[in-house]
Image: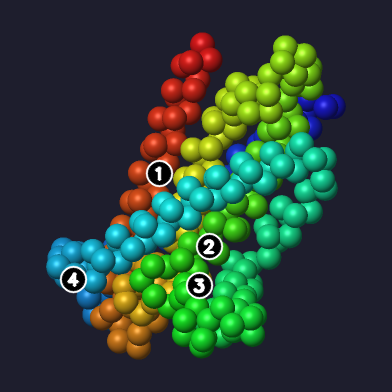
């Protein structure tokens, strides 16, 4: 009975996965056709690379790509570091992991609004600094929102991503045999040595996967950059959203060209992940 149940669960799981893949491929195929000028609904019915040429010739595309990569790479890297510290601290102190669950539950947009209220030039921290005479006026407080440094966006993604990474790492710590940690302590290992020689090899395997997940989410999300990002340069996802929501249908193919590039970045990330998995399996053998 148990074996049949397991087979049925696996069958349903694969069926659901196949359905999701089919839906994704249908949507991607439609986007790809429109990006090549095959959009009969608005009178475009001839295959062309013109929209790709226009997008690639646009200087704002290059600046948006670099801006998006900077935000995604830096925020994902910081999230991994933050996740390591948070999870190890909670694991050692045996504190309930509610401190990780709350940021995970809250949407990115809520985190961004909270940071805006705290760290903007008219926020709580700036007002406290003004009251304590640390700054003469609100404009003297550091500006981390609405400018090219994108510190507010990076901080938002790092906090959310750090909580997610921390939860994953915490589960890995809990799966490690207490006997290994006890043996290391008995042999005189310090906390740092215990971490690097026993714990770190376990989380090292998952760090790349978590990084790629956070990276792809950050580069494809537009809500936070739309709320607290600069008007120039914009992230690729936000640029695509703005192009797509214009009333003129002639902008739709350009928006979908940008989406194709974002999809290619996701595909490269998937290939890197698969290569990493193959490498890990070969080492195990």
Sequence-wise, the earlier of marks 4 and 2 is 4
Pick whichever of labels 3 and 4 is earlier in the sequence: 4
Disc nearer the start of the sequence (1/3) = 3
CA separation, marks 1 and 4?
25 Å
* First-in-chain label (1 vs 2): 2
Residue drawn 62% across the image and 69% down it: 111
Identify residue for label 3. 223
State which quadrant residue 39 falls in: bottom left
Mark 2 touches mark 3? (CB < 8 Å): no
Q: Which secondary structure, mark 2?
A: helix
The quadrant holding residue 161 is: bottom right
Q: Which mark is residue 58?
A: 4
Q: Visible in this render: residue 88?
A: yes
The answer to whether the residue labelled 1 contacts the one labelled 4, judged by CB atoms less than 8 Å apart, is no
Q: Residue at x 50, y 78 (%)?
A: 141
Q: Which residue is mark 2?
A: 155
Determine crowd level at label 2: few under 14, some 14-19, many 20+ residues with C-alpha closer than 10 A.
Answer: many
**Counting residues from the N terminus, which is met first, the one under dot 1 or under dot 4?**
4
Q: CA distance from mark 4 to mark 2?
A: 29 Å
Residue 269's label in the rendered image is 1
Crowdedness of circle 3 by 10 Å Cα count: few (<14), some, many (20+)? some
Residue closer to the observer: 285 or 119: 119
Q: Are marks 1 and 3 in contact (CB under 8 Å)?
A: no
């Amino acid at each position: 009975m148990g074996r049949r149940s397991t087979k049925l669960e696996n069958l349903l799981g694969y069926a659901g996965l196949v359905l999701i893949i089919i839906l994704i491929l249908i949507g991607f195929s439609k986007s790809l056709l429109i990006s090549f000028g095959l959009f009969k609904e608005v009178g475009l019915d001839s295959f062309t690379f013109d929209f790709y040429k226009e997008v690639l010739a646009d200087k704002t595309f290059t600046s948006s790509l670099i801006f998006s990569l900077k935000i995604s790479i830096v925020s994902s890297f910081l999230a991994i570091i933050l996740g390591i510290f948070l999870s190890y601290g909670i694991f050692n102190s045996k504190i309930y992991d509610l401190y990780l669950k709350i940021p995970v539950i809250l949407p990115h947009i809520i985190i961004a609004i909270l940071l805006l209220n705290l760290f903007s030039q008219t926020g709580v921290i700036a007002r406290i600094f003004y009251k304590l005479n640390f700054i003469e006026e609100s404009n003297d407080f550091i500006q981390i929102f609405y400018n090219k440094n994108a510190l507010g966006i990076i901080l938002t993604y790092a906090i959310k991503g750090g909580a997610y990474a921390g939860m994953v790492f915490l589960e890995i710590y809990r799966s490690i045999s207490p006997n290994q940690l006890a043996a290391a302590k008995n042999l005189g290992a310090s906390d740092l040595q215990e971490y690097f020689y026993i714990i770190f090899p376990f989380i090292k395997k998952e760090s790349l996967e978590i990084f790629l997940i956070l990276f792809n989410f950050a580069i494809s999300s537009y809500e936070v950059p739309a709320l607290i990002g600069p008007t120039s340069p914009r992230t690729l996802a936000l640029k695509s959203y703005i192009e797509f929501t214009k009333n003129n249908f002639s902008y739709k193919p350009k928006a979908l060209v940008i989406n194709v590039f974002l999809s290619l970045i996701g595909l490269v990330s998937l290939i890197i992940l698969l290569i990493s998995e193959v490498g890990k399996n070969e080492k195990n053998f």
